[in-house]
Amino acid sequence: PLVSGTEFLKAAHKGGYGVGGFNTNNLEWTKAILEAAEAKKAPVLIQTSMGAAKYMGGYKVCYDLVKDLVDSMGITVPVAIHLDHGEYEDALECIEIGYTSVMFDGSHLPFEENIEKAKDVVAKAHAKGVSVECEVGSIGGEEDGIIGSGELADIEECKQMVATGIDYLACGIGNIHGSYPDNWTGLAFDHLQAISDAVGDIPLVLHGGSGIPLEQVQKAISMGVSKINVNTECQEVFAAATRKYIEEGKDLEGKGFDPRKLLAPGTKAVTELVEQRIEWFGSTNKA
Ligand code: G3H
Ligand code: ZN
């Protein structure tokens, strides 16, 4: 069923395991993620970025797709439909539409404004039973070919953000979106521990989950990370499987050009990756 993220992420935080937040772009990815979660008996968040929602035809389309598939596929595991990196207006729109979890990402705003808007999103979301994720500092990433190492979130700011009543906190600990550069020095575990100690009993969110080695992901989970976001790696395996299918000329054999056949290998690759990440995070059989 569709549920908010709060309860299962609290359980994950308490139980010392992680739950995946996987980004979707279309019907195939949504089915792939749901199938994997159901096979592993794991709770899961299916998330749409603002760009993905625009691509898919709006938040209502995304919401209806996830909700209807959860019903028609007979999904029994807890599923949250989550807005990823949303602006304030987008968060409010998703709350209205029925999203069960939203990220208001005000990390690019002056800190006071980030806090004020977070409070407002929390009030409106909680009135409808919707969970809220907010971000402090900013997650690094590649910009114009210059690769940032990932900003470390300010501990005092993390505390103030948690005091707004949010349900889970995204904070920079040397993590970055997209693939990690060769000279990446890894997650800043001392900083993660300091944040964890300072904010108390609240699930932390690790963005940029693609490309972090297994041991580091699991260590982060043991230190209070309960939600791990994965996007780029799903795109990579989808593209690789699709390329292989075409390069092998499968699209030229019989009805191999049929989109239902053409998209199948990529979709299967996404399912397999999501299942493997669920294993990594420890949420198998936690539904
Ligand atoms: O919010 C989305 C995630 O942080 C995805 O990061 O593309 O590096 O896996 P990723
Ligand atoms: Zn992110």
Image: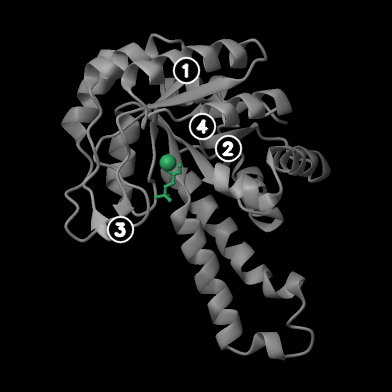
Secondary element type, mark 2: strand
Q: Which mark is residue 44?
A: 2
Ligand 2 closer than 8 Å to label 4 CB: no
Question: Mark 1 or mark 4, which is nearer the start of the sequence?
Answer: 4
Q: Quadrant of the N terminus?
A: top right
Which residue lies most toward the right here?
72
**269 is higher (above) or lower (below) than 198:** below
Ligand 2 closer than 8 Å to label 1 CB: no
Side of 52 where 281 appears, left or right = left
Ligand 2: image quarter:
top left
Q: Which mark is residue 117?
A: 1
Residue 81, picture quadrant = top right
| Residue at point 22%, 25% (across, down) | 193
Label 3: how many Cα within 10 Å (few below 14, some 14–19, many 20+): few
Task: Say what amino acid the circle numbered 3 marks.
Answer: Asp
Q: Which mark is residue 87?
A: 4
